[in-house]
């Protein structure tokens, strides 16, 4: 951030919906303002980007609509995309792209607006590609011009949250010939490990400790599973929240093999684990006064002679047994071990798990809304509020305790005749999966976040790029921040 615009650096300004002309242009005494506005049909709608008038010091004008925080995010993402496009044109024409731009903010902008703007600016240009071609030039620095020092902290915080989203996207987008359980564990060490304590356990430790779910799911792959434990401990008196993430680095479905169509997307089946890794790093960088433990069970669900089978009985950490009925319901198997470990070893004040768990949630809520299950109304409200601040949509789904007379039916359906529980009890798929996981929470305060829909985007919109979205990372950070 800077207080004064510099003449040598290309300048962008903003325009509100219906504004006769951007105030910044008028303030510079640009005599062509009205004529230029008519010529380009400037509306000021959120996401509109226009090149500035010829001869003006303003190179670009960005529309911010009515000026709501969400529209500032849209404007920031659109501006970054437009800047990158213009820089690519300059490079193609043999000109040296100007990689630093300054954006002048009106005096009326507040912390909420600038936070969303920074999120859009930082994420709007996100790109993940593995190609032989050189990466196109992109904007390197966008300096915000404002005289309000109170915006410094919101800008810094928003940048950390945007980086968390980008990290979660990078981890989930990485192809699975590179990304195996050991790789994901190493990346947790290289990222969150810079600011928090990270311990990685291998398959020998998992066997000794009785992590039967992780070992069963990972048993069909030649690349063995891992268990990642990340710890941020600012104060002994701080509340303790455990975040549990599903880390399936590729999912064939195992013996209950998936259809070929869409299987290539299963490289993002560890998006929940990615969100937890990114959130722990962001929480530590923000210095939040909450003790946080992040647990990620990492495994590949492959089809081979050593793969687990429908009909198997698996003993989880802590001793509870599961009757396997569908090897493609592997996420709940590895999550069960982590949840049981959290209950027995960590005794937290709150457990939150996040996973691309069920296709049922995609059918129920689509691709932009996450499913929320919570053990109490208070916890559900906290997650919904965190999502609102983070700009991520959640919809509360019912657990057995929420559905009256149907409760006994759902709860009873989890029981197995030959084991403690069965992996895929009958009933609505998302609810059935949540009911299974609840068996391993020890009655502690708990929320389950099913992100099967919003973890991936089929197209680019606003600050979201096609592919992994990084969904849930910011919600986790905001949820923890609310307990600080």
Image (spheres, helix red, strand yellow):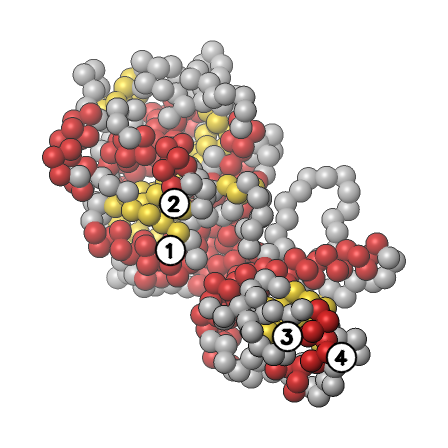
Which tag, 4 or 1, sits closer to the chain's start?
A: 4
Query: The N terminus appears in which quarter of the rendering?
Result: bottom right
Distance between the alpha carbons at the discs numbered 3 and 4: 12 Å
Which tag, 1 or 2, sits closer to the chain's start?
A: 2
Query: 431 or 24, which lies in front?
Result: 24
Q: Is residue 46 left or right of residue 98?
A: left
Q: Farthest residue in the top direction?
A: 305
Query: 346 or 456, which lies in front?
Result: 456
The residue depicted at 60 percent of the width and 30 percent of the height is: 177
Q: Position of residue 430 (x, y in %)?
A: 32, 34
Instruction: Specify few, some or many for label 1: CA neighbours under 10 Å numbering under 14, 14-19, or 20 or more.
Output: many
Q: Which mark is residue 370?
A: 2
Q: Which residue in the protein does label 1 denote? A: 387
Circles 4 and 1, Cβ within 8 Å, touching? The answer is no
Circles 3 and 4, Cβ within 8 Å, touching? The answer is no
Q: Is residue 438 left or right of residue 468?
A: left
Distance between the alpha carbons at the discs numbered 2 and 3: 35 Å
Q: Which residue in the protein does label 4 denote? A: 56
> Which of label 2 and label 4 is nearer to you?
4
Instruction: Specify few, some or many for label 4: CA neighbours under 10 Å numbering under 14, 14-19, or 20 or more.
Output: some
Q: Which mark is residue 115?
A: none
Q: Secondary structure at mark 2?
A: strand
- Height in image: 161 above or below 226? below
Q: Is residue 447 left or right of residue 184?
A: left
The residue depicted at 55 percent of the width and 55 percent of the height is: 462
Q: Which mark is residue 13?
A: 3
């Amino acid at each position: 951030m800077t207080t004064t615009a510099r003449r040598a650096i290309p300048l962008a300004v903003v325009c509100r919906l219906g504004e006769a002309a951007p105030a910044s242009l008028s303030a510079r005494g640009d005599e062509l303002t009205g004529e230029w506005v008519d010529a380009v049909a400037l509306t000021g709608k959120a996401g509109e980007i226009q090149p500035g008038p010829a001869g003006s010091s303003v190179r670009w004008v960005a529309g911010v609509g009515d000026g709501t925080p969400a529209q500032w995010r849209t404007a920031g993402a659109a501006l970054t995309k437009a800047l990158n496009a213009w820089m690519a044109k300059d490079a193609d024409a043999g000109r040296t792209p100007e990689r630093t731009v300054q954006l002048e903010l009106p005096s009326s902008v507040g912390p909420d607006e600038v936070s969303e703007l920074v999120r859009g600016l930082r994420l709007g240009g996100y790109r993940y590609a593995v190609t032989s071609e050189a990466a196109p030039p992109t904007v390197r620095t966008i300096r915000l011009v404002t005289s309000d020092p109170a915006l410094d902290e919101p800008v810094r915080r928003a940048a950390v949250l945007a980086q968390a989203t980008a990290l979660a996207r990078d981890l989930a987008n990485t192809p699975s010939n590179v990304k195996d359980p050991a790789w994901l564990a190493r990346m947790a060490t290289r990222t969150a490990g810079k600011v928090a304590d990270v311990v990685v356990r291998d398959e020998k430790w998992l066997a000794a400790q009785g992590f039967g779910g992780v070992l069963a799911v990972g048993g069909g792959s030649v690349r063995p599973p891992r268990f990642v434990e990340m710890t941020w401990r600012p104060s002994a008196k701080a509340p303790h929240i455990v975040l549990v993430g599903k880390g399936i680095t590729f999912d064939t479905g195992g013996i209950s093999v998936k259809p070929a169509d869409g299987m290539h997307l299963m490289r993002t089946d560890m998006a929940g684990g990615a969100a937890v890794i990114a959130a722990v790093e962001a929480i530590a960088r923000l210095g939040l006064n909450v003790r946080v433990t992040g647990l990620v069970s990492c495994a590949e669900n492959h089809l081979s002679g050593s793969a687990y089978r429908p009909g198997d009985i698996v003993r989880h950490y802590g001793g509870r047994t599961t009757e396997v009925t569908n090897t493609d319901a592997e996420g709940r198997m590895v999550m069960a071990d982590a949840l049981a470990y959290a209950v027995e070893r960590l005794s937290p004040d709150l457990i939150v798990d996040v996973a691309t768990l069920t296709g049922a949630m995609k059918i129920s809520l689509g691709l932009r809304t996450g499913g929320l299950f919570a053990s109490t109304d208070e916890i559900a409200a906290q997650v919904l509020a965190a999502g609102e601040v983070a700009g991520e949509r959640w919809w509360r789904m019912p657990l057995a305790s929420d559905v009256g007379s149907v409760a006994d039916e759902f709860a009873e359906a989890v029981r197995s005749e030959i084991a403690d529980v069965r992996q895929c009890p009958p009933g609505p798929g998302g609810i059935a999966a949540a009911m299974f996981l609840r068996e391993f929470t020890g009655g502690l305060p708990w929320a389950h976040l099913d992100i099967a829909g919003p973890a991936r985007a089929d197209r680019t919109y606003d600050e979201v790029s096609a592919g992994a979205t990084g969904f849930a990372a910011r919600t986790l950070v905001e949820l923890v921040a609310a307990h600080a």
